[in-house]
Image: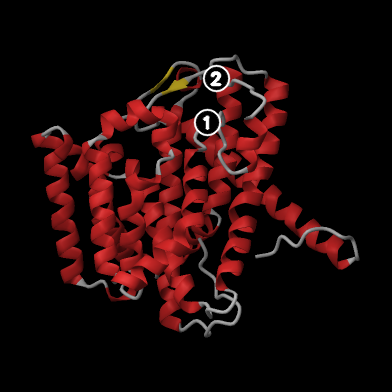
């Protein structure tokens, strides 16, 4: 959730700063992957199947890595209170702002009922971070839940050891994959998307990576590439029911390792590092901005997506590479608007206005 140095913690070493640069670059890659998913520009090509479809789970591995690193560096006194206050400012406040814009958008564009069903309880769900009815918002709800439970994850990892905790999370996630069909029937597709146990192993794996990112060597790269190759062979050639789903979900762990190694070798390309790092540092805001842009175009031009395909409406009326560019520009524009609002808020607070402190 955070990459900067917490108050009261030890100063960041140069090695730690290099590690954070690699993580930010991977997050930048991941938000570009999310854009390609939502624009459907590569459809179900092998690039999507083997690489970009895994962008969100890679985000969750990095969430576990950054969050555990934050907990270890932060002095214990007041740590829980600071964690939840930061979560409120970094996750819920932007989500509330996004929901407010969405309500205005719905009032103006008036999407048909199959797309949006306004209910009396909807404002409450939005208030607690469940952005129901807002398309592609499931990741926001998932992150809110992981922010709430992560202190427990940290305690369990300290109590039983990170490897034992990882093994427990592995079993839990494996269970959700084996019983995916009854779980989907029980939870429904929206409930299944925001069901945290299916990603427990990703967060736990990220916690294991703390202190190891800058030490990923050739041996770790070879092992990770071998795991990726095995997972891809299972996806492409074997297809043994639930076994395929297991390979598909767990290959995101070695994929993150490979991406971290690659990004650490690309840091010398200044423009690439600066670009991906900026995207990574603003990835959550970009996700929210892209969500608003994507929803607006779907409400205006139509279009439908399920778990596996996107079709009709915007996906037929636009060249999809052009639409990808629209999503990128729209997400960046919303981030710049949000940053400007934060600047105004701080300026007015400095002038004596009683406004909330939104600085993290």
**Label 1: which secondary element:** loop
Q: What is the crowding at mark 2: few (fewer than 14 residues within 10 Å), some, or many (at least 20)? A: some
Q: Is residue 109 visible?
A: yes
Instruction: Measure the C-alpha gap from mark 2 to mark 1.
Output: 9 Å
The answer to which of 227 and 266 lies nearer the viewer is: 227
Q: Residue at x 54, y 51 (%)?
A: 284
Q: Is residue 308 visible?
A: no
Outermost residue toward the right in this view: 352
The answer to which of 165 and 241 lies nearer the viewer is: 165
Q: Residue at x 45, y 18 (%)?
A: 316
The answer to which of 10 and 12 lies nearer the viewer is: 10
Image vertical order of residue 255 relative to residue 237, above or below: below
Instruction: Look at the numbered discs 2 and 1 and tell me whether their residues touch, using CB distance below 8 Å.
Output: yes
Number of labels in the image equals: 2
- Residue 297 got which mark? none
Q: State the image coordinates of residue 77 (x, y, percent, origin top left).
A: 57, 79
Query: Left or right of 200: which side holds 91?
Result: right
Q: State the image coordinates of residue 14 (x, y, percent, origin top left).
A: 45, 82
Q: State the image coordinates of residue 236 (x, y, percent, origin top left).
A: 14, 36
**Label 2: which secondary element:** loop
Q: State the image coordinates of residue 111 (x, y, percent, origin top left).
A: 62, 18
Image vertical order of residue 126 relative to residue 285, above or below: above
Mark 2 — residue?
115
Q: Residue at x 28, y 29 (%)?
A: 182
Mark 1 — residue?
135
Image vertical order of residue 52 relative to residue 221, above or below: above
Quarter of the image holding residue 102? top right
Q: Residue at x 14, y 50 (%)?
A: 229
**Between discs 2 and 1, the one toward the N terminus:** 2
Q: What is the crowding at mark 1: few (fewer than 14 residues within 10 Å), some, or many (at least 20)? A: some
């Amino acid at each position: 959730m955070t990459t900067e140095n917490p108050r009261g913690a030890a100063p960041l070493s140069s090695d730690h700063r290099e590690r954070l640069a690699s993580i930010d670059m991977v997050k930048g890659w991941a938000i570009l992957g999310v854009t390609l998913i939502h624009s459907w520009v590569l459809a179900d090509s092998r690039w999507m199947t083997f690489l970009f479809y895994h962008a969100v789970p890679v985000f969750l591995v990095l969430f576990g890595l950054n969050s555990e690193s934050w907990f270890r560096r932060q002095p214990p006194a007041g740590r829980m209170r600071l964690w939840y206050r930061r979560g409120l400012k970094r996750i819920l406040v932007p989500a509330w702002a996004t929901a407010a814009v969405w309500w205005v958008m719905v009032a103006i564009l008036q999407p048909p009922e199959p797309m949006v069903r306004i209910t009396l309880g909807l404002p409450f769900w939005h208030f607690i971070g469940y952005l129901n009815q807002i398309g592609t918002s499931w990741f926001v709800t998932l992150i809110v839940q992981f922010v709430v439970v992560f202190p427990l994850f940290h305690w369990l990892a300290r109590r039983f050891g990170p490897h034992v905790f990882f093994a427990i999370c592995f079993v839990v996630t494996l269970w959700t994959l084996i019983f995916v069909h009854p779980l989907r029937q029980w939870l429904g597709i929206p409930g299944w998307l925001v069901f945290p146990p299916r990603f427990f192993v990703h967060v736990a794996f990220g916690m294991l990576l703390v202190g190891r990112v800058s030490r990923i060597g050739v041996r770790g790269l070879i092992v990770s590439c071998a795991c990726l190759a095995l997972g891809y062979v299972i996806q492409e050639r074997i297809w043994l029911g639930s076994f395929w789903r297991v390979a598909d979900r767990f290959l995101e762990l070695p994929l993150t390792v490979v991406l971290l190694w690659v990004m650490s070798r690309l840091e010398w390309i200044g423009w690439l590092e600066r670009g991906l790092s900026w995207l990574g540092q603003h990835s959550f805001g970009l996700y929210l901005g892209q969500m608003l842009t994507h929803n607006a175009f779907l409400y205006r031009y139509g279009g439908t997506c399920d778990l596996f395909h996107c079709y009709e409406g915007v996906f037929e009326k636009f060249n999809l590479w052009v639409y990808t560019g629209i999503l990128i520009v729209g997400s960046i524009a919303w981030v710049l608007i949000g940053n400007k609002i934060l600047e105004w808020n701080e300026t007015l607070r400095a002038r004596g206005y009683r406004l909330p402190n939104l600085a993290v």
